[in-house]
Amino acid sequence: IPRELLQAIPGVEFTEMERIRDNSYCCGGGGGVMTGYGDWASKNASKRVEEGMRTGADKMVSICPFCHYNLNEGAKRINSEMKLVDLVELMDQVIAEPE
């Protein structure tokens, strides 16, 4: 459903990353990975941001707050200007208030 939501937003050009669904891998943000395996989580987050950059996108959307944090840190680590956006916050911005 997150993909369907993104594709339904006018003006959003949805682009898939190279590794998706069954071929995807964890950024290292959730499940206590950052705490137990911080170096691994940091490197994986940076790799995922680099993969996002290769698509030409200027934003990546995450639904998990831990992934959002870790990917932001990964972007900083490699001096990327990639913007990380939380899906719920994005939906809040695009849904019109009832009049």
Image: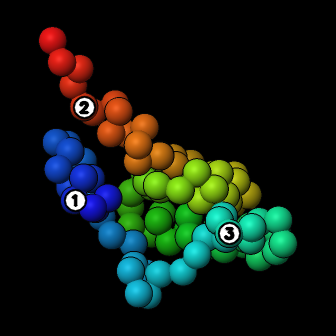
> In the displayed structure, does residue 97 sit left or right of residue 52?
left
> In the displayed structure, does residue 69 sit left or right of residue 18?
right
Q: Secondary structure at mark 3?
A: loop
Q: Is residue 76 above or below residue 31?
A: above
Query: Which amino acid does the dot numbered 1 rest on?
Result: Glu
Q: Percent x, y for residue 94? A: 27, 33
| Residue found 44% across the figure and 87% down from its top | 23
Name which of mark 2 and mark 3 comes first in the sequence: 3
In which quadrant will I find the C terminus? top left
Tell me if mark 3 has few (under 14), some (14-19) or many (20+) residues whose alpha carbon lies within 10 angstroms of its own: few
Q: Percent x, y for residue 87? A: 40, 48
The count of marks equals 3
Tell me if mark 1 has few (under 14), some (14-19) or many (20+) residues whose alpha carbon lies within 10 angstroms of its own: few
Find the distance from the CA under tag 1 to the CA under tag 2. Answer: 15 Å
Residue hosting label 3 = 31
Query: Which amino acid does the dot numbered 2 rest on?
Result: Ile
| Residue found 21% across the figure and 25% down from its top | 96
Residue hosting label 1 = 4
Find the distance from the CA under tag 3 to the CA under tag 1. Answer: 26 Å
Residue 55 in sight here: yes
Residue hosting label 2 = 95
Q: Percent x, y for residue 18? A: 40, 79
Name which of mark 1 and mark 2 comes first in the sequence: 1
| Residue found 17% across the figure and 50% down from its top | 8
